[in-house]
Amino acid sequence: MMLLLITALSAAGSIPAMQATAQAQAPGLTAEDVVSVRTVSAAVMSPDGRHVAYTVTRPPLEDANQARSTVELFIIPEAGGEAVPVISYPLSASAPYWLPDGRLAFTARLSEHSNQVQVYAVNASGENIQKLTDAATGVMQFAVSADGSTLIYRSRDAETAEQRQRRSLGFDMIVASDPPRAIRLFAQPLNTAESRALTPDGWLVQDFAVSPDGREAIVRKTTNPLADYDLMFSELHRVNLQTGEHSLLTETAGKLGRITYSPDGGQIAFLGAKVFSDPLPQRIFVVNRDGSNTRDITPDDYHGTIEWIGWKDNRSLWFTAVESTRTTLNEIAARGGSITRVAGGGAEIFSGISPDARGRTFAAAVNTSTHPGEAFTGTFRNGSFTRLTHHNSWLSERSLGRQETVRWYASDGLWMEGVLVYPVGYQEGVRYPLAVLPHGGPEGVDLDGWNTRALYPVHLLAANGYVVFMPNYRGSAGRGSWFTMANHRDLGGREFEDVLLGIDFLEEKGLIDPARVGMSGTSYGGYFSAWAGTRHSDRFAAAITFAGLSNWISFTGTTDIPVEMMHTHWDLSIFDNMGQYWDRSPVAHLQNAGTPTLVATGLADERVHPEQAIQLFNFLRLLDVPTDLVLYPRQPHGLLERAHQLDFMERVLDWFGTYLKD
């Protein structure tokens, strides 16, 4: 084995030494704490730069009738001060959007007005709510023309009277070949509730952007309701907002992301994939309004994953990106060229920004290693950040484990990075049990910010005496298309070896006891856990898999994204490579299985069908490997309900406590 090099790249997000000393006697995070966290998920700057609207996800309450999260909406002065509540529990709001007249628009389902999600507006003081739309099936997304005269939104067609009648009689079959109800683009003058459809029957409008002159929109559309088509086969079309005439904007391949017009409307920028097999739409494309001169302006040597784009002016763009375990705000010319860092690269983690009309300040939802998302403002002049909100002030009464980014080298010489959290009360020279928490995707990424949530209870584990390791193995986001495709044709191979070598270097550093290593992951991270407990059972004393893959062949036949998995992750057709699909399946290596494995999943999961969990559990049970199966009713590809979140975290502590400590 080659000599492993570990580097602590940054401790900028860790607790300052004086603070850590002051909190030495404070308790660590509990499961109840984890489900009590409030998170700012969106922050939008008003055009005049005087106000910030933001949304806060409020966690589920103990009342079973309010078992899921709600989203509250606030307005706060840009200079700071008291936030004004606009929509509060038990109601929810989303998509805050400042109108040209200075009002704040948003979507909500307000029971006294409508049983569907509609668009509403309030003044900057948070008063005088006005309902703007009356869409029969609700509004899914909206925008407003630059002159403020027209509201554009997308909405699904209503059922016909005949369809409603048949369903009332029990004819509620789901037939794959039945044509879907269209998702159309609608235009509505803001001074009336009357709207008109702009896109034809058969279109499923998934996203759109309106031109500054309000005459047209770029629409991302599909014609098939399956998730695979939305991910892999959508198209960009120009739609005339007066006549409904439409045409293909430009040819694209693979996944597509955000769309935005230049201020003069002459160019369109969008995020797209480098090639069809790129796992993410992480490159900037610019095209003329007439569809000519489409070009990828992302430098080939840029090692980052672009997440958001916006125009600075008619000649240049801003973009935010994940770079390794940090996030940055950057500038690039529309013709391409070099990249200039504007902000970021430090403790603040953010995924997008909202600039004011003059391009002087911006708002963003920001998290760090010591707090979840809060509303911040920033300046383009010097890239500084200012915190506006403190929705989890009680966290100052908790002790958190020290957190840092670490680096090691893979067997082929590639450097790898991950996020490391030390146990609360860490003592130099003591070897601790290790909890490896691999992210999903596999094109996910762990950042050096706030990572604690029910399925990944990082600081809960640190509070209970574990070193926590979140590795960004090859295939992860944050280092460009080349890195997200570096695991192609080798799933479960070198990408998992990256993790094993990461564990080795933690052992060489003297941090962990190699005989007490456990892994817990969700989705593709759950696949890693099942792979750890079977193919690599000799390295792991415990495994926990939630919504994890156990059989690549049956997974491909039951998931809602078989095309996406085959092309952007495997880069191998199952029909020509059945043997390799089977060889990289955890259930193909049951002869090695000896790791006690807790298996859990949601019963409403369409991404990773519950059969994946059931078959792994049954095979392990037949082999007398310590195992258990937990099925969560109503839960999709994750855990939404409070009781289920608490239950899972307690089971994680019990399972790891039994096999990594006792």
Image (cartoon, rainbow, N blue to C red):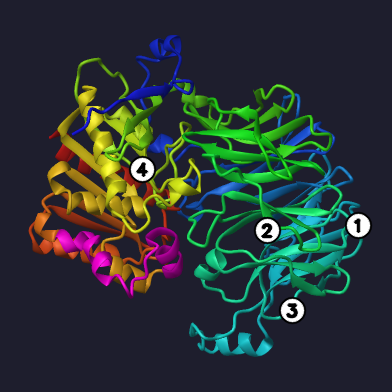
**Magenta segment range?**
560-589
Neighbours of disc 3 within 10 Å: few (<14), some (14-19), many (20+) = some
Q: Can the viewer see residue 471 in this picture? A: yes
Residue type at tag 1: Ser
Q: How far is the residue under mark 2 from the one under mark 1?
A: 24 Å
Measured as percent of width and height from the top left, residue 326 is found at 51, 32
Residue position marked by numbered label 4 in the rendering: 473
Which quadrant holds residue 587? bottom left
Picture disc at residue 149 = 1
Neighbours of disc 4 within 10 Å: few (<14), some (14-19), many (20+) = many
Q: How far is the residue under mark 2 from the one under mark 4?
A: 41 Å
Q: Can the viewer see residue 402 in this picture? A: no
Of the two numbered discs 2 and 4 on the same chain, state the one appearing first in sequence.
2
Main structural element of the magenta stretch: helix, strand or loop?
A: helix
Which quadrant holds residue 117? bottom right
Of the two numbered discs 4 and 3 on the same chain, state the one appearing first in sequence.
3
- Circle 4 — which element? loop
The residue closer to the viewer here, 274 or 82, is 274
- Circle 2 — which element? loop
Q: Quadrant of the C terminus?
A: top left
Is residue 118 left or right of 433 when viewed as pictured? right
Residue type at tag 2: Arg
Residue position marked by numbered label 2 in the rendering: 109
